[in-house]
Amino acid sequence: MDGYEVKRVMDQVHISAEMQEEVIMNVQDRMESGKKRTWNVRRMAATAAAFALMAGLAGFPVRAFVGAVQERMESVPKAQMTELNNMVQ
């Protein structure tokens, strides 16, 4: 991406002229220095661990709910279950 393309893209964004010039200069500086944005391995590992923890914690209430529903269904007497089934049919 050369300077002309950056300027063309920035013209489509509605920000002040000073901010636009600052963004263009930052892009040019990064392009000239050859710095690329790299992912920090520790940050990625921490994010993955947090995601796994959240997924695990979200699973506990679901399992408890399923267990409660299953327990309730098993405690319904057969006669009542047959009556409910016939009503649904």
Image (cartoon, grey):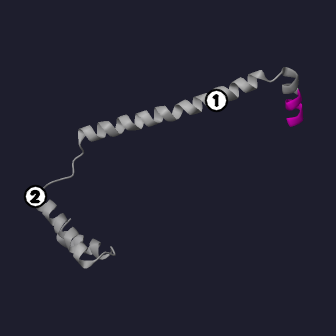
Q: Secondary structure at mark 2?
A: helix
**Which of the 4 image quadrants contains residue 22?**
bottom left
Residue 10 position in % (x across, y down) = 27, 72
| Residue closer to the observer: 50 or 33 | 50
Query: Is 78 situated left or right of 5 in this image?
Result: right
Please give the residue where the numbered disc 1 appears in the rendered image.
66
Q: How many marks?
A: 2
Please give the residue where the numbered disc 2 appears in the rendered image.
33
Tag 2: residue type? Ser
Determine if the magenta segment contains residue 88: yes
Quadrant holding the N terminus:
bottom left
Query: Is 56 situated left or right of 78 in this image?
Result: left
Q: Nearer the viewer, mark 1 or mark 2?
A: 1
Q: Residue furthest bottom?
A: 17
What's the distance in space between the residues labelled 1 and 2, CA to CA? 57 Å
Residue 35 position in % (x across, y down) = 14, 54
Residue 80 position in % (x across, y down) = 87, 26
The magenta-colored residue range is 83-89
Q: If you read the primary sequence from the N terminus, does the residue marked by circle 1 or circle 2 appear first?
A: 2
Tag 1: residue type? Val
Is residue 36 positioned above or below 70 on the image? below
Which dot marks residue 87? none
In percent of the image, x 31 and y 37: which residue is there?
46
Q: Main secondary structure of the magenta part?
A: helix
Query: Is 83 situated left or right of 69 in this image?
Result: right
**Which of the 4 image quadrants contains residue 53?**
top left
Q: Secondary structure at mark 1?
A: helix
